[in-house]
Image (cartoon, rainbow, N blue to C red):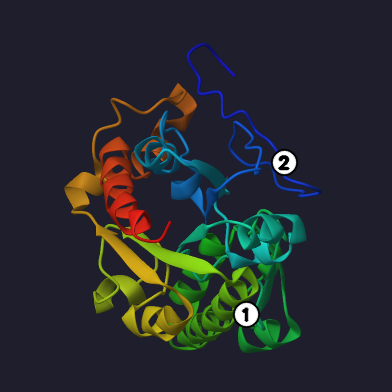
Amino acid sequence: MGGGAIDYAPCRYGKSRIAFRGPKKKLEDAYVAFVGGTETYGKFIPTPFVSQVEGSLGIECVNLGCVNAGIDAFLAEPAVLGVTQHADVTVVQIMGAQNMSNRYYKVHPRRNDRFISASQMMQMVFHEVDFSEFHFNRHMLQSLKTVAPERYTMVREELRMAWSARMKLLLNTIGGKVVLLWVADHSPDDEAATTELGRDPLFVDRSMVDELMPLVDDLVEVVVSPNEAEGSTDEMVFSEMEQVAAKRMLGPSVHGQTATALTKVLQGLI
């Protein structure tokens, strides 16, 4: 890393194949576990919301966020699930539906945003598409939408069904007290945003979230305006080559809002 870069202090828990943001926690006393994607990890953010919640609550908070993760990354890691099962409370960020294997395509088991291969069914439905050209799920889905918008909706609906089933499995596996976290530039009630391709968490709407409510203790929704979502990158740390990626991230102010909202809920559960 160049001068001034964030030291993410990567660490592993048990036999996990995924390196998480450190510093590594001892897991000996009470703690809150945080499972999620890029926002939970806090890419480019010196003090992500997980660390801010730890400071406010005075209780150890374990950052199990993984950049570009989908649900599969955590279901495939027994060591990580073990950490959540022994937590006083687990916060699960609502992640998009595109980054997980399904009947149409397979993703990388840890780097879930990576497209691995199309199933025979996918190749039959989109016979005119050369899937060897794709390396990332979002790029592949965008191409399908352009080539065959009506058939693309079949894939989108498959992803939604798979997401619901996989999330229920994750929540049931974690058990104990669980808080769902929605942090995005739109509400799950925004039909246009939840059906279009491009705004995370991709394809997840209110009905899908409502299905999960019997399995959790609470839901924290942090919905920010487009201006807040784009925000200023002044307090973010990144190299010149990472500038474009950094501008797409939810900035420090959003992390502050998220930490405040989560702290209020967690105080009543710990």
Q: Quadrant of the C terminus?
A: bottom left
Identify which amino acid the numbered label 1 is placed on.
Glu
Left or right: residue 99 versus residue 101 is: left
Residue 46 visible in rendering: yes
Residue 165 position, x and y percent, is 58, 83
Q: Quadrant of the N terminus?
A: top right
Q: Which mark is residue 196?
A: none
Of discs 1 and 2, which sits in the foreground? 2
- The image quadrant that residue 107 belongs to is bottom right
Residue 13 position, x and y percent, is 72, 45
- The image quadrant that residue 234 belongs to is top left
Q: Nearer the viewer, residue 256 or 245?
A: 256
At horizontal 22% and vertical 54% (from top left) the residue drawn is 224
- The image quadrant that residue 206 belongs to is bottom left
At horizontal 44% and vertical 37% (from top left) the residue drawn is 51
The residue at the far right in this view is: 15
Tag 2 secondary structure: loop
First-in-chain label (1 vs 2) = 2
- What is the CA distance from the residue labelled 1 to the residue labelled 2? 43 Å
Badge 1 vs badge 2, beta-carbon distance below 8 Å: no
Tag 1 secondary structure: loop
Residue 207 position, x and y percent, is 35, 85
Q: Which mark is residue 128?
A: 1
Number of other residues with Cα within 10 Å of mark 2, as a class: few under 14, some 14 to 19, many 20 or more: some
Vertical side of 85 occupied by 175: above or below:
below
- Find disc 2 in the rendering and name its residue: 12
Residue 205 position, x and y percent, is 35, 78
Vertical side of 62 occupied by 11: above or below:
above
